[in-house]
Amino acid sequence: MSFWITDLRPVELRERDPDQDFNIIIRQAYKQVLGNAYLLEGERLETAESLLRNGDLTIRGFVRAIGQSELYRSFFFEQCSQYRFIEMNCKHFLGRAPLDQAEISQHVQIYNNLGYEAEIDSYIDSEEYNNAFGENIIPCPRTESNQRTLLNVGFNRTYALYNGYASSDNITNKATLISDLAANKPTPIVFPKRSSGGTPGTNNKRFRIKATKASVGSLNRFSNQTYNVDYAQLNAKIKNLHRTGAKIVSITEI
């Protein structure tokens, strides 16, 4: 079985090509940056679209306009956890999953210190974005077929974020990779399940977090701690452990 994301070809705005269809280009940009969310006619960014059609805005500029819009903010910031927000930013602007917990932490600091706009710009103005997409290629999934240096774990996590592409990214506010990234675990490939009863969710799952923490008054002794939490509590518990100086050893589903 092949992975559908390896078959996608980047959509590029070609200079001096009078035959290109701007409707297709604009529609694909919305689809990628808004995570396949349904877009009402009145929600379109008419000014940015006009600037793009007139040659006064590049694809990178149009992607930035969507990311900085109130629409994107309402879909992926106001209703989402911070982990989910960063996870979706990596997917929508860089075409991949977050690399590790360190990258998540870096973007948490950018948002906390500099704000929402700086967090969005940090992806679009990055050297990685420039090398992958430049000024006129719409961001798209990056896999081993178009990014030779992508490690297996990166491909698996990217697939996990794009799995079920027909669905919209704004149907859930829960982070997909939070446990794997926090514990530095590989992400397995899981194919979509077919079920007449609807798509199975993760809200009823429970996880066991194992962590170590230095004992009070000792630099060399560590205590082992185990916590069983529901999926809805996982994000908050991980943040709390990090704040108290604990090191997460593993996170497993129970």
Image (tube, rainbow, N blue to C red):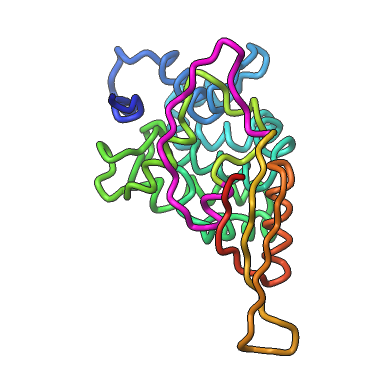
Which quarter of the figure has residue 239?
bottom right
Where is 117 relative to 28, above or below? below
Specify start and end residues of the magenta stretch as a single range. 178-203
Task: Examine the rendering and report whether any part of residue 13 can be seen.
Answer: no
Q: Is residue 77 magenta?
A: no
Q: Position of residue 35 (x, y in %)?
A: 54, 27
Query: Which residue: 57% across, 23% down?
Result: 168
Q: Main secondary structure of the magenta part?
A: loop
Task: Examine the rendering and report whether any part of residue 233 can be seen.
Answer: yes
Query: Which residue: 69% across, 34% down?
Result: 204
Q: Position of residue 187 (x, y in %)?
A: 44, 45
Q: Is residue 29 left or right of residue 116?
A: left
Q: Is residue 252 left or right of residue 82?
A: left
Q: Is residue 197 magenta?
A: yes
Q: Quadrant of the N terminus?
A: top left
Identify which residue, 230 or 95, lies in the foreground: 230
Where is 55 relative to 194, above or below? below
Which quarter of the figure has residue 22?
top left
